[in-house]
Amino acid sequence: MVTSSGIGALCLALLCAAPAYQTRRPQAASSPAQQTPAAQSLADAEALLQQQQFAPAAEKLQAIVARHASNPQAWFDLGFAQSHLNKPQEAAAAYRKAVELAPPWFEANLNLGLALAKAGNTAQAISVLKHAVELKPSTGGDQSLGRAWLSLGEVEAESAPADAIAAYDRAAALLPNDSDIHLDSGNLLEKTGNLAGAEQRFQRAAEMGNRQGMLRLINVLIQQERYPDATTWLQKYITQDPQDASARVDLARLLASNGKVADAIAVLQPAAGSAGDRNATRELAQLYLQNKQYALAAPLYQQLLSTNANDAQLHAGLGVSLLYQLKYADAEQQLLQAVKLKPDYAEAYDSLADAARENKHYALAIRALDARGRFLPENPKTYFNRASSYDHLRITKEAIANYKKFLEVAGGKYPDQEFQARHRLKALQPQ
């Protein structure tokens, strides 16, 4: 017979091998005490198992059970060896014999359930595991029983999610320090659409210091559009892990969406720049544009373009930042490149028209406005810019038509341009 600690190690390794339980390693104990004529052979086989020599161990154990078929320990060990040889059906058959010979043996029932699950016999696995959790572990007490409930939950997750959640909760009660159980149950609740239940489980994991639980909590809060709560938890998370650039990007977006652009910028600055995260750098550049800090945005866009020259949005961002620094020629070149890379980029055409007009490239400005018009409706600005461009080109008919359209929709919101439009119409249409 192998010692209790030896069987514990064997069960640990078996549970590692089961694909659904790679991070769950409950302890097991020895089988009911009994002596067999093949005691030394069994000890030799178990020594091979300890050395992870599973094929020779399985061969030796098959010879033992052929001569001594009433030895539950030998069947248990054979099941263990077959599991590690990736023969789950053979493993299940061996464990089933161990259970038949020693029905109250918790560890044998548990490993039978795991082997059946690995073999794809989910319904049988659930039935066996439900029986296993009613038995008393040989060693490990609540720890072993909690792991068995966790195993049951993981096997039930696909076919019976409500039962799986109940099993997870039983496991959590027996394993109060295991935050991953709350994470697992939260993930399952989220998958079934129960965001409130998922939030509760993720918050438990987060409060236990589980970083992944905190991230999952933030995600479900965002899904529920509870942005202030999500912001609070993101700030807590970043305090714990200041190097997580993705979390900083998420927090910055939440802050910016609530009008706290300066705060969003402050969150991103440590993660962005020449040695920083690319996504954080891109987000920071966009925030600088939004906050009208064009001189700070431009070098970030230039840096990003140095490694991704075919990104239309980066060219457009750089073009806009240059436009508002009155660097019209450079801005025009960047915006031309943006629409060349992305011909349906309506916003870039808008800015291109502004840059071209400032460069006195009025024909280009009109082409840009016409291209924009294929994707977005006209507005007072586009009418005025088109009218002014035609006016400079001395194309009177189109200039008059666009000045009139501008005045029809301006509604007194653009007093300077409205004055100019009326003045030009009088000049272009002398009485």
Image: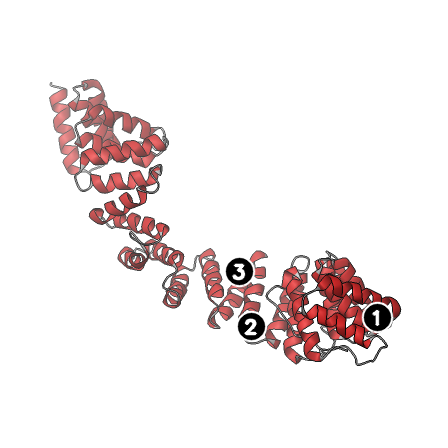
Of callouts 3 and 2, the N-terminal one: 2
Judging by the rendered image, the residue that carries numbered circle 1 is 100
Quadrant (top left, top right, bottom left, bottom right) of the N terminus:
bottom right
The image shows residue 399, relative to residue 106, as above or below, that is above
Q: Position of residue 385 (x, y in %)?
A: 21, 30
Q: Quadrant of residue 339?
A: top left
Q: Residue at x 56, y 76 (%)?
A: 176
Q: Position of residue 359 (x, y in %)?
A: 17, 30
Indicate left or right for 170 with 41 as reference: left
**Foreground tag (2 vs 1):** 1
Q: Which secondary structure, mark 2?
A: loop
How far apart, in angstroms, are the residues tagged by discs 1 and 3?
Answer: 43 Å
Q: Position of residue 82 (x, y in %)?
A: 74, 62
Using a 10 Å C-alpha cutoff, classify the residue at mark 2 as few (fewer than 14 neighbours), some (14 to 19) or many (20 or more): some
How far apart, in angstroms, are the residues tagged by discs 2 and 1?
Answer: 33 Å
Using a 10 Å C-alpha cutoff, classify the residue at mark 3 as few (fewer than 14 neighbours), some (14 to 19) or many (20 or more): many
In this view, the residue in front, 271 or 396, is 271
Q: Residue at x 49, y 61 (%)?
A: 216
Q: Amino acid at mark 2?
A: Asp
Q: Quadrant of residue 372?
A: top left
Q: Amino acid at mark 1?
A: Glu
Q: Which secondary structure, mark 3?
A: helix
Using a 10 Å C-alpha cutoff, classify the residue at mark 1 as few (fewer than 14 neighbours), some (14 to 19) or many (20 or more): some
Judging by the rendered image, the residue that carries numbered circle 2 is 178
In this view, the residue in front, 235 or 269, is 269
**Foreground tag (1 vs 3):** 1
Q: Is residue 341 visible?
A: yes
Judging by the rendered image, the residue that carries numbered circle 3 is 195
Indicate left or right for 76 with 209 as reference: right
Q: Is residue 409 visible?
A: no
Q: Are marks 3 and 2 in contact (CB under 8 Å)?
A: no
In this view, the residue in front, 425 or 244, is 244
